[in-house]
Image (cartoon, helix red, strand yellow):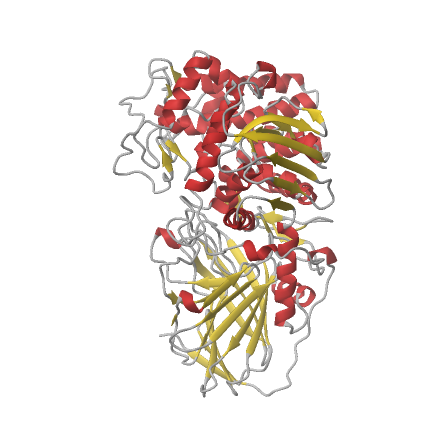
Amino acid sequence: MMKSKIYAFIAGLTVAGALGAYNSSNTEDNKESENLIEFVNPLVGSGDHGHVFVGANVPFGFVQLGPSQHVRGWDWCSGYHYSDSVIVGFSHTHLSGTGIGELGDVTFLPTLNPAVTESLFSHENETVRPGYYKVVFSDTGISAELTATERTGMHRYTFPASADTAYVRLDLAYGIGWDKATDTKIYVDSDSTVTGSRFSTGWAKDQKIYFAANFSRPFASCALEGDSIAIFGFTEPSEPVELKVGLSATSVKNALNNLNVENPGWGFDEVVRKAAGKWNKALATVQVKGSSDEDKKLFYTALYHTMFAPSVFSDVSGDYYGADGEIHSSGDGVIYTTFSLWDTYRAAHPMYTLLFPEMQSDLARTFIKIYEEQGVLPVWHLVGNETWCMQGNPGVVVLTDLALKGFDMDLEKAFEAAKNSALADNRSLDLLKKYGYVPFDLDPAHETVAKGLEYALADAGVAKLADKLGKTEDAEYFGNRSRSYRKYYDPSTKFMRGLSSDGHFSEPFDPFHSEPAKGDYCEGNAWQYLWLVPHDVHGLVDLMGGEDQFIEKLDSLFVVEGDFGDKVAPDLTGLIGQYVHGNEPSHHIIYMYNYVGQPWKTARWSRDVMHRFYKNEPAGLFGNEDVGQMSAWLVMAAMGMYQVEPEGGKYIFGSPLFEEVTISPEGGKPFTIKAIGNSPENIYIQSATLNGKPYEKSYIMFDDIASGGELIFQMGDTPSDTFGVAAESRP
């Protein structure tokens, strides 16, 4: 049994606060805009397999303060599932939409009994909106309200009028999923200030979180149970208790500094108002008109969900915890974390380049710093740790895309980082360099087709950047590697298959079978991975025998049915035939029709998926949110375009959901997309103009959007036999 220490306090004790440098733009009071948060339903994706974070945060904030529950299985990866009715506390860090549970740091619970470690609630007594969360516990009647800034969380606990006791429990042992505390410390600095740290291991092997917490009024007692539990007792329970908590990954001093700078007062309602203002400002980067209110709710809820990550990681002082385990300075910019790049390189990051150009240079700087600290670009980076999760070189993809789009960065350093990451020897890259592909018989980790195809599309970005910089030899080398996908293609079965070191395809072969960590594919089967050549669609068309064969096979994807097997990953959801919208490798496939002159099929399927797999309800996502990617697909599709080729900024047209969409990025020029005559029936583009001039192409380049202007579509209820059909009009 842990030893318990009891402390009594005399009112009036003080604690000095550390002050430091700060970029005031992080907490400025944003100008009022349309109240778009009314169209956001934060509970979408909290049921089924969505795994979304539910709670209070601000756009791209480090602190994501919300309810945490007992982890009862895979669907509790975010710490919260709509089916549950028990809350163990309010934690300051969460993930959204992942397939692995992690974080859950620094958990507080208000209670009437110091021995109680959980409380019951009903959704009828729960209020959630961007930047604000409230619940009234059904077993105690305690009201808990939460809000946040970028690096701090704020609580307001109101106890029942009839209560004669009031306690707040701090738990540093609690963690979500794989997360296990390894070292915790609690320091009672005064009768209203507590500081400490929580180190843990799990998905992130060496996670460090420091905190500083201030109570709005003195606690009368504090019971410590070991180094991980503290229970604070308050007199006069009828008076609300407010609590402010600052977090840092570098030190208690910086946690306190973050708190003092970002949230110096005790105006809970004012913090809520500012958080709402930040959300309204961020959501207003895209303004939509037309269609139904239900579509508007789906759109803005999706846009909201794309802004949970990447999350701010550097302190207001600029300090951050590096991938090498050392403390570094971010300089003039912000360092970010939470990069689910295998997912987000596909739609989320291309979306960020359009909507949030002002943060892209900081993202590029973050990537380059990670490269300098760990030797390669990030794969799946989390609180300063490389998790090495998923296949390929997605950090290469994102960085080269930013470089090719012209965002400010050290291009030579970016190329060095991309090239050296592609030439590393880990994660089967040594085999790729030796054989020109990844032989399945030499790779005990399996999934070699997935690895090979992901590496090829990343290598295309290295080749393009090398060409931009005039590095001819590198451009040729990586260009050749980007075409290595051809080695996996088996013309006899017309699928991508595992290839051995002596040139034989893997056996037995079942194009439908899928099993995690075994076989040739990652979270998919041969039907989905046939199309993972987004960087060279025309090359894939030629490989498959020409346009007729390509179209016939692509058409069949949406109708063919087969058995995944009894060991299939739960991610393979949202099926139309063998198209799997619930997982990322399928997300670009619909838009490949434009490359062969049939954009009307892209229009039909994109409209279908928008309404089939996105609903305004807790079970409204047909797959994991995957840290913004699932929702980013909807945002891009609803705007009428999608970046198929991972690097370079070519956005392929589909079918815009709204009559008008205006992209108004901060510091950028507005770009408006109008769909004249748009309706649930009129889903097909008949013709287009760009800035008043006829526009025949079924795609648009990033530079055209970033330059500002107006794209007008004429819509109709039947496919056009001219728009996007001619070879010169195709991407």
Number of callouts: 0
Judge by depth and name the residue closer to the eye, 331 or 147: 147
**Image position of 560 (left or right of 627):** left
Q: Position of residue 13 (x, y in %)?
A: 64, 83
Q: Position of residue 417 (x, y in %)?
A: 62, 33
**Image position of 356 (left or right of 106):** right
Judge by depth and name the residue closer to the eye, 613 or 465: 613
Image quadrant containing the C terminus:
top right
Judge by depth and name the residue closer to the eye, 284 or 513: 284
Q: Position of residue 116 (x, y in %)?
A: 38, 76
The residue at the far top in this view is 545
The answer to whether residue 38 shows anywhere in this view is: yes
Q: Does 459 appear above or below 250?
A: above
The residue at the point 50 percent across, 49 percent down is 294
**Quarter-of-image position of residue 569:** top left
**Quarter-of-image position of residue 319:** bottom right
The residue at the point 68 percent across, 20 percent down is 471
**Image position of 26 (left or right of 100):** right
Q: Position of residue 31 (x, y in %)?
A: 72, 57
Q: Does 29 appear above or below 468?
A: below
Q: Does 570 appear above or below 453?
A: below
**Image position of 499 (left or right of 698):** left
Image quadrant containing the N terminus:
bottom left
Q: Does 428 appear above or below 77?
A: above
The residue at the point 50 percent across, 85 percent down is 237
The answer to whether residue 423 shows anywhere in this view is: no
